[in-house]
Image: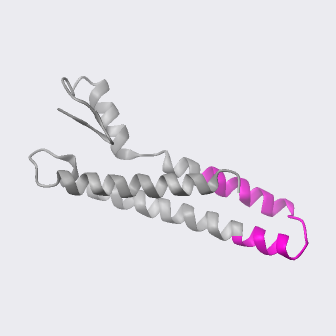
Amino acid sequence: MCHSSWALGVGRRLLDELSRYAVARAGRTGQIADSDAFHTDFARAEAKFRAAAALVRETWDDVERTLDSGRTLDVRQETMVRLALNHITSTITEGPQSLRECGRELAGLAAGESWALFGLEP
């Protein structure tokens, strides 16, 4: 399974924590969680994660069936294992809100703020 299970867990936790954070901050003036862009990016991140997770599960189900039958994996199955692992890992590292917050701080627009969970706060 390599680290695909780890990536699935981290990805799910990241999205769940980001959702909790957004709910806690909603309604406050100037919060990114209230923006259409955040909602759109969050929906895209959820869809990308679920699609990547489905690929991991489909691939590992196929591997399990093959190994349970006493056969060895063929080259295509090994390729799919590597592809699924790479895809879930790259999917969970996209983190659009984190990138926006990094960009805001690097641009000098977060003076006096510090990191708290996934965002910068005063």
Taking the magenta stretch, the answer to whether it contains residue 62 is yes
Q: Examine the image and state in which quarter residue 122 appears.
A: top left
Going 33% across and 42% down the picture, which residue do you hit? 118
Dominant secondary structure of the magenta stretch? helix
Most extreme residue toward the left is 29
Compare residues 122 and 99 and report the one nearer the observer: 122
Which quarter of the picture shows residue 52? bottom right
Q: Quadrant of the N terminus?
A: bottom right
| Residue 121 at least partly seen | yes
With respect to residue 5, does 110 lie above or below?
A: above
In percent of width and height, residue 4 lies at 63, 55
Q: Is residue 68 above or below residue 92?
A: below
Residue 35 visible in the current orientation? no
Q: Name the foreground residue: 103 vs 13.
A: 13
Residue 91, how many percent across, how many down? 52, 51
Going 57% across and 49% down the picture, which residue do you hit?
89
Above or below, comparing residue 13 to residue 121 in the picture: below
Q: Quadrant of residue 60?
A: bottom right
Image coords of residue 62 (percent x, y): 74, 72
Q: Is residue 89 magenta?
A: no
Report the side of 120 relative to 94 (left or right): left
Q: Is 45 placed left or right of 116 in the picture?
A: right
> Left or right of 112: which side holds 46?
right
> The magenta stretch spans which residues?
61-87
Q: Is residue 109 left or right of residue 55?
A: left
Q: Residue furthest right?
A: 71
